[in-house]
Amino acid sequence: MIDALAMTQAGMANDVQRLSVISNNIANVGTLGFKKEVGVIRPFQAYLAEGVLSSAREGGPDSGPELSRVTDFSAGSLKHTGNPLDIAIEGGGFLTVSTASGDAYTRQGSLQLDQTGRLVTGSGNAVLGTGGEIRLTTSTPRIDQTGAVWEGNTLVAQLKLVNIARPDTLMKTGEGLYQASDTTDVLSGDGLRIRQGYAETANVVTMHEMIKLIETMRHFEASQKLVQGYDGMLDKAINEAGAL
């Protein structure tokens, strides 16, 4: 019974984490370029391979597998804005931006010019071209499908676009930014296509998230009743044993 109780409590803890994930997704449904998170539990075979069950027998009851937060990098739909500084990447790929901690990657293409004419993200990070920071003299440049930035007939810069072989190896740093880890393979962005005047919406489907929210709440409530039942049984057993 104690083992079952511990596993039920672990399941409730996972439900709390899952609710946090779902709530964050719903809160960012209107955030351009936002990538939703998914709560996942590693396959049972992975725990067997690490000898979790044998260690549990040696050290006490196992509390069960823990929930992990995984980012879903599937593309959101493209929304026409008509703003020449809004760009969206078709399919995969990332823009490269400069941050205080080094280069980072983002899908949020709602750009602007700062006071010095630098092309920056909404959070003020400089968008990088193949030659470094991009500076413009007009807020209405032409950005073609290859990522070339033009002012009139003058080629000003080429956006530094990259592909990531395994986006799941990226580290989320907030504000729609990701940085490479030791296992991240950054590839050339050749072949990526840019849509000027468009913005990528969040890849969150509100209805799906609401369904998962209801399912998680019901599972938590059922687990709570189970724990309360176990508690009542233990209380009854202890009181009856003490009366003997």
Image (tube, rainbow, N blue to C red):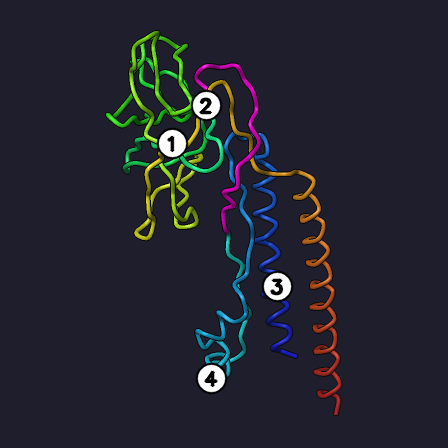
- Inter-mark Cα distance, 4 to 1: 50 Å
Q: Alpha-carbon distance for marks 1 and 2?
A: 10 Å
Q: Which residue is drawn at 42% across and 46% down?
A: 167
Label 4, residues with CA under 10 Å away: few <14, some 14-19, many ≥20? few
Element carrying mark 1: strand
> Could you say which is closer to the camera, residue 71 or residue 192?
192
| Cα–Cα gap, marks 2 and 3 | 42 Å
Q: Earlier in the sequence, mark 2 or mark 4?
A: 4
Dot 4 or dot 1, earlier in sequence = 4
Under circle 3, the secondary element is: helix
Say which label, 3 or 4, has the lower sequence index. 3
**Residue with the mark numbered 4:** 58
Amino acid on which the number 2 mark rests in the picture? Ile
Looking at the picture, tell me which residue is in the foreground, 189 or 204. 189
Residue drawn at the location 39% of the way across and 10% of the way down: 139
Q: How many numbered circles does the render carry?
A: 4
Residue marked by disc 3: 11
Determine which of the numbered discs, if any, sits on residue 180 in the image. Answer: none
Estimate the x, y position of residue 223 in percent, counting from the top left. 69, 64
- Furthest residue toward left: 131
The overriding secondary structure of the stretch rendered in magenta is loop
Q: Name the residue under label 2.
A: 87
Find the distance from the CA under tag 2 to the CA under tag 4: 56 Å
| Residue type, label 3 | Gly
Q: Are marks 1 and 2 in contact (CB under 8 Å)?
A: yes
User: Which element carries disc 2, helix, strand or loop?
Assistant: strand
Residue at the spot of label 1: 95
From the top left corner, tell me how far across and down residue 2 is, in percent. 62, 78
Which corner quadrant of the image does residue 205 belong to?
top right
Work out whether mark 2 precedes mark 3 in sequence or the reverse, and give the earlier one.
Answer: 3
